[in-house]
Amino acid sequence: MKTKMRNIAAALLLAAGASTAFASETRSSELIADYSSEVLLLENWMLDAELFKAEESKDPNATVVEIAVGNPDFSILVEAVTKAGLAEALSAEGPFTVFAPTNAAFESLFSQIGVSGIKDLTAEQLTPILTYHVVPGKVMSTDLSNTTVGTLNEGNKLKIDLSDGVKINDSNVVAADIEGKNGVIHVIDAVLMPK
């Protein structure tokens, strides 16, 4: 949404000031600096921060579910959590550490298991997979070590390997420490499958 608003703001600025900018002898660096500050001012005026809280990845006032809902890269994860009936539980006080697969990670899984999407899976199939992505407690990247940790999928642990980047089982952490009021999200590039 911010990118769309930034493009609208840029178009408004260019339309309103194009003749002035090109008619003057303003240096291009001054024009870019003016453009950037004007875009920020217009964005602040155009966006109601209360309406777009979940759009921000790092929002300490949003739950881990609200953060996921506000990020288009997690739309398949949100669909799965909703279908499995876990949204309310993951919106509770927690804290939770969520290893959140991207849409690309889910699409890769779908092709591996021969389904076209979440609609082809039942809540009973999704629940053990999704709970395997959640660790009780708030585990920041600075707290990680080479170890195994228990998940909300009882009896199933995740292997954390820091020897070459950060790996959770066979997935890579591609973004870390997205904090919310009830936990933290670490973004991963593969869906974790319990054994």
Image (spheres, rainbow, N blue to C red):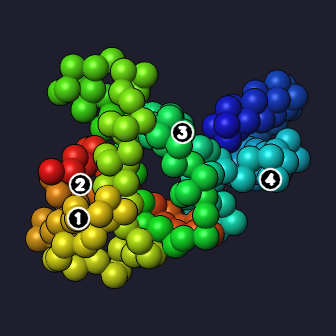
Which residue occupies 38% across, 45% down? Answer: 127
Q: CA distance from mark 3 to mark 1?
A: 24 Å
Q: Name the residue type under label 1.
A: Gly
Q: At which x and y percent is residue 73?
A: 47, 39
Q: CA distance from mark 4 to mark 1?
A: 42 Å
To which quarter of the image does residue 76 belong?
Answer: top left
Say which residue label 4 marks.
49
Q: Name the residue type under label 4.
A: Ala
Say which residue label 2 marks.
172
On screen, residue 145 above or below 106: below
Q: CA distance from mark 2 to mark 3?
A: 25 Å
The nearer-to-camera label among 2 and 3 is 3
Secondary structure category for the residue under label 3 = helix
To which quarter of the image does residue 7 belong?
Answer: top right
Say which residue label 3 marks.
82
Q: At which x and y percent is residue 87?
A: 56, 49
Secondary structure category for the residue under label 4 = loop
The nearer-to-camera label among 3 and 1 is 1
Q: CA distance from mark 4 to mark 2?
A: 32 Å
- First along the sequence among labels 3 and 1: 3
Q: CA distance from mark 1 to mark 2?
A: 22 Å
Say which residue label 1 marks.
155
- First along the sequence among labels 2 and 3: 3
Relative horizontal placement of residue 118, taking residue 62 as reference (left or right): left
The nearer-to-camera label among 4 and 1 is 1
- First along the sequence among labels 4 and 1: 4
